[in-house]
Each structure stands twice: as C-alpha cells, then as structure tokens.
Image (cartoon, grey):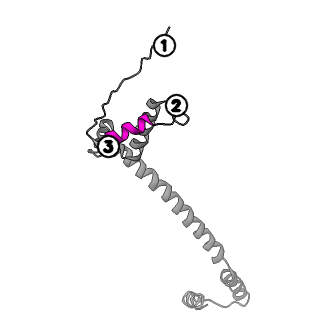
C-alpha cells in the first residue's frame, strides 16, 4: 500500500511566452539526477536560499508585521525595562568609580604620612626638650614652604 503524504501542496505554472519561465523550465527538465535527487527539494532549497539572501522583513507577511511591531511606540513595560537597565548600568559604573576613588584616596593617605609628618612630630619633641614656644602661624607657613 502506498504511503499517503500529508504535506502542503503549492502548484505553479511556467508560461511558454515568458523567457524567464522558459529558462527555468529548461533547467528543471535538465537537472542532473546524480546531483539533484528531487526537484521538490531543489525548489525548496532555491526558495530558502533566495529568502535568506533577501530581507525577510519585507518579503513575508509575518516579517513585515514583526518589523512594524518593532518600530511601533514604546509601551510602559518597555520603559520600565529600559529604566532598570539604565539604573543597573549606572550603579555598576558608580561602584567602579567609588572603588577607584577609594583606592586613590588610601594611596594618597599612605603617602601623606611620609617624612613631613614625622619631621613635625620630631621637631615638636625637640622644641619641648629645649622649652621653646612654637607659633602656630609660623609652623603652618613652614610646612607649606617645605
């Protein structure tokens, strides 16, 4: 008993008065059976290749509807998604920036307790040993001058 194919059927007619149709008919009749096992599969492959080569958005009705939907107005849900993405991106950038600033600040703090701070502590001890009074204004100017 023959197997019943429950496939979809699309018939097309090739005109003898159209040069392009005559050329396609000649190709279909002259296909090499060693290369092309099925004319149906050859036509399917040709249509699929041609469709993929073109912009599907304009070629098919479904593609045109999806393109129109993409180009339509933004919904509230879309706006909420966009806001969340922006907020998350800003939070990540702010965390990176704060860590960079913290690293810079702590690095500068380590450098700021260098010889100048030690020198002031040593000179204060020496001045106390000799019972010399210090002037805050002069000390401030001296530290600024180096």
CA distance separating discs 2 and 1 = 19 Å
As drawn, 42 above or below 50: above
- Residue at coordinates 28% horizontally, 42% vertically from top-left? 68
Q: Quadrant of residue 74?
A: top left
Question: Is 123 displayed left or right of 90 in the figure?
Answer: right
Q: Secondary structure at mark 2?
A: loop
Query: In front here: 48 or 104?
Result: 48
Tell me whether circle 2 and circle 1 mark residues in contact (CB < 8 Å). no
Numbered circle sitting on residue 3: 1
Query: In front here: 146 or 141?
Result: 146
CA distance separating discs 1 and 3 = 35 Å
| Residue at image mark 3 | 20
Q: Nearer the viewer, mark 1 or mark 3?
A: 3
Query: In front here: 89 or 99?
Result: 89
Q: Which residues are magenta?
A: 19-30
Q: Is residue 20 magenta?
A: yes
Query: In front here: 118 or 68?
Result: 68
- Residue at coordinates 27% horizontally, 41% vertically from top-left? 18
Tell me whether circle 1 and circle 3 mark residues in contact (CB < 8 Å). no
Q: Nearer the viewer, mark 2 or mark 1?
A: 2
CA distance separating discs 3 and 2 = 24 Å
């Amino acid at each position: 008993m023959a197997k019943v194919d429950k496939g979809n059927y699309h018939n097309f007619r090739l005109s003898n008065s159209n040069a392009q149709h005559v050329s396609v008919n000649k190709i279909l009749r002259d296909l090499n059976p060693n290369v092309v096992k099925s004319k149906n599969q050859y036509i399917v492959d040709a249509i699929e290749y041609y469709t993929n080569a073109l912009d599907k958005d304009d070629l098919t009705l479904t593609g045109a509807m999806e393109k129109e939907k993409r180009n339509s107005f933004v919904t509230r849900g879309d706006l909420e998604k966009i806001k969340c993405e922006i907020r998350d991106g800003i939070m990540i950038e702010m965390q990176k920036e704060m860590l960079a600033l913290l690293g810079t600040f702590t690095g500068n703090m380590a450098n700021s307790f260098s010889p100048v701070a030690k020198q002031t502590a040593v000179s204060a001890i020496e001045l106390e040993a000799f019972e010399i009074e210090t002037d805050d204004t002069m000390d401030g100017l001296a530290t600024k001058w180096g």
